[in-house]
Image: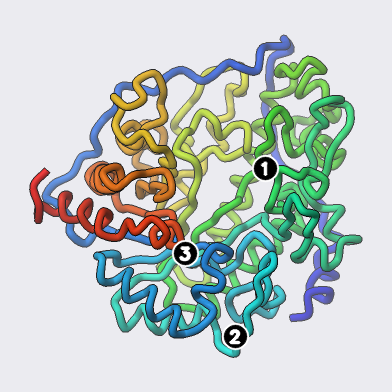
């Protein structure tokens, strides 16, 4: 389908969302939800040697390495050799182009200053080779990412291909220096991924249709993994502050639209409408996930829905990503009494908890939640058995011993494992240490 013809179908769609309430007192932004309960080990029986052991393959970082079939063959051979049995393959990266045979999106032949010329189907070839090697493939979709920019002024991707249209639908934040003003993400040099705002129905529909297209054309994928399905991060600034967002937030609550200083005050604190706005944004993300799930399962009920997010649940309210169960009710000034209804764990088959830290054991960072051990032991305090969880770690953050320990902990306390990511694994020569972690969990080597 021609993209402009596709857009015309949805140009007139209007939106509404749904309801609840919040207090009026201004409070300080530093308040956090209370500490979770004492960590509980996930119940389990014998060691499961067939647990998913996945490698994430980032599109940009591996763009040239995987530019040929020979390159794909070589990397998959290593993945298989060192004990991995699954890959997360980035097929719709944050620039908004396609690494699969798409009728909706342009083909991804350029990323930043890198260019490849493929006359073959990237996802199709991975599926063919992975079937030979008995490796499962989950297709990763950078859901709201539709452009790429860098600090040198490079701007490329779908948003910039038709800026008159897409530039009106990007995420917008308050100006930290003047919270009555706004800054579109395209003017924020800290943001390399240009993210569209999921509050717009046209954006939701585009994301859903991309997922539907992948599942329809590639029935052998194990699942769809959702990445960047949230609002962007900025120190001091909050995305989801466009006039449209504020209008829709008011409709959600059956009230007039809040002002930006109702949400974030001139001094940078939480305003009287912050909690209502936070719930509205979180429900926007959750509703989008529900649409994706329903559409994908209607095509292939066996296709799994995965989503990666930071393991630090308490930080997620600021990017509208409530990966907890609807049964989990947080307390704190940043939450409404009904914030729990935005939880989306029940809409996932697998949550991938991002324990991306160099502190492996709780004793390494005792004053903080930030350790791999803590995150892989506490995730179910939030998810409450609504879906499976895979522990994921960042290769770039860990030394050799840390890689082995963190891999072992993920497999011991969660339903699977994901390593982020292939280029870092190669650069750090970490393959044998991941394998050692696998073998420790499976009892092939001693602790």
Q: Earlier in the sequence, mark 2 or mark 3?
A: 3
In the picture, residue 241 is in which quadrant? top right
Residue holding disc 2: 118
In the picture provided, is 420 more to the left or to the right than 31? Answer: left
- Please say if the residues under marks 2 and 1 sit with CB atoms less than 8 Å apart: no
In the picture, residue 38 is in which quadrant? top left
Residue holding disc 1: 232
In the picture provided, is 155 more to the left or to the right than 338? Answer: right
Q: Position of residue 109 (x, y in %)?
A: 66, 77
User: Residue drawn 60% across and 16% down?
Assistant: 30
User: Residue drawn 70% across and 73% down?
Assistant: 105
Q: Position of residue 112 (x, y in %)?
A: 69, 65
Q: Which mark lies nearer to you, 1 or 3?
A: 3
Residue holding disc 3: 57
Q: CA distance from mark 1 to mark 3?
A: 22 Å
Helix, strand or loop at disc 3?
A: strand
Q: Position of residue 407 (x, y in %)?
A: 28, 48
Disc 2 residue crowd, few under 14, some 14–19, many 20+, Cα 10 Å: few
Q: Earlier in the sequence, mark 2 or mark 1?
A: 2
Vertical relation: 86 (above or below) 257: below
- Color style of the picture: rainbow
Q: Residue furthest bottom?
A: 119
Disc 1 residue crowd, few under 14, some 14–19, many 20+, Cα 10 Å: many
Helix, strand or loop at disc 2?
A: loop
Q: Position of residue 211 (x, y in %)?
A: 59, 67
Vertical relation: 311 (above or below) 208: above
Q: CA distance from mark 2 to mark 3?
A: 18 Å
């Amino acid at each position: 389908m021609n993209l402009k013809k596709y857009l015309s179908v949805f140009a007139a769609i209007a939106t509404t969302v749904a309801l609840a309430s919040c207090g009026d007192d201004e409070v300080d932004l530093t308040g956090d939800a209370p500490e979770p309960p004492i960590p509980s080990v996930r119940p389990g029986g014998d060691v499961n040697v067939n647990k998913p052991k996945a490698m994430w393959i980032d599109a940009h970082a591996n763009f040239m390495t995987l530019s040929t079939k020979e390159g794909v063959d070589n990397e998959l051979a290593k993945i298989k050799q060192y004990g991995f049995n699954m890959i997360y393959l980035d097929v719709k990266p944050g620039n908004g182009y396609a690494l699969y045979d798409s009728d909706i999106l342009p083909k991804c032949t350029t990323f930043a200053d890198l260019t490849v010329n493929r006359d073959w189907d990237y996802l199709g070839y991975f599926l063919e080779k992975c079937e030979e090697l008995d490796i499962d493939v989950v297709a990763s979709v950078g859901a709201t990412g539709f452009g790429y920019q860098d600090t040198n002024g490079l701007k490329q991707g779908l948003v910039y291909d038709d800026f008159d249209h897409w530039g009106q639908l990007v995420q917008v934040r308050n100006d930290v220096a003047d919270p009555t003003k706004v800054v579109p993400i395209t003017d924020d040099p800290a943001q390399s991924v240009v993210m569209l705002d999921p509050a717009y129905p046209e954006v939701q529909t585009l994301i859903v249709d991309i997922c539907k297209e992948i599942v329809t054309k590639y029935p052998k994928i194990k699942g769809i993994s959702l990445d960047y399905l949230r609002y962007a991060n900025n120190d001091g600034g909050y995305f989801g502050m466009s006039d449209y967002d504020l209008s829709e937030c008011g409709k959600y609550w059956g009230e007039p639209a809040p002002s930006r200083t109702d949400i974030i005050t001139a001094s940078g604190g939480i305003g009287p409408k912050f909690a209502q706005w936070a719930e509205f944004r979180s429900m926007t993300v959750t509703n989008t996930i529900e649409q994706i799930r329903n559409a994908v399962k209607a095509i292939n009920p066996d296709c799994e829905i995965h989503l990666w997010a930071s393991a630090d649940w308490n930080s997620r309210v600021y990017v509208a990503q409530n990966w907890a169960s609807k049964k989990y009710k947080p307390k704190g000034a940043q939450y409404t009494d009904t914030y729990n209804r935005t939880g989306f764990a029940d809409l996932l088959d697998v949550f991938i908890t991002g324990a991306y830290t160099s502190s492996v054991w709780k004793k390494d960072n005792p004053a903080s939640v930030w350790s791999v051990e803590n995150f892989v032991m506490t995730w179910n305090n939030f998810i409450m058995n609504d879906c499976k969880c895979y522990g994921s770690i960042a290769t770039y953050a860990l030394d050799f011993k840390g890689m082995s320990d963190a891999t072992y902990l993920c497999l011991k306390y969660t339903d699977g494992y994901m390593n982020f990511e292939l280029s870092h694994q190669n650069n750090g020569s970490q393959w044998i240490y991941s394998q050692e972690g696998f073998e420790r969990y499976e009892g092939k080597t001693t602790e």
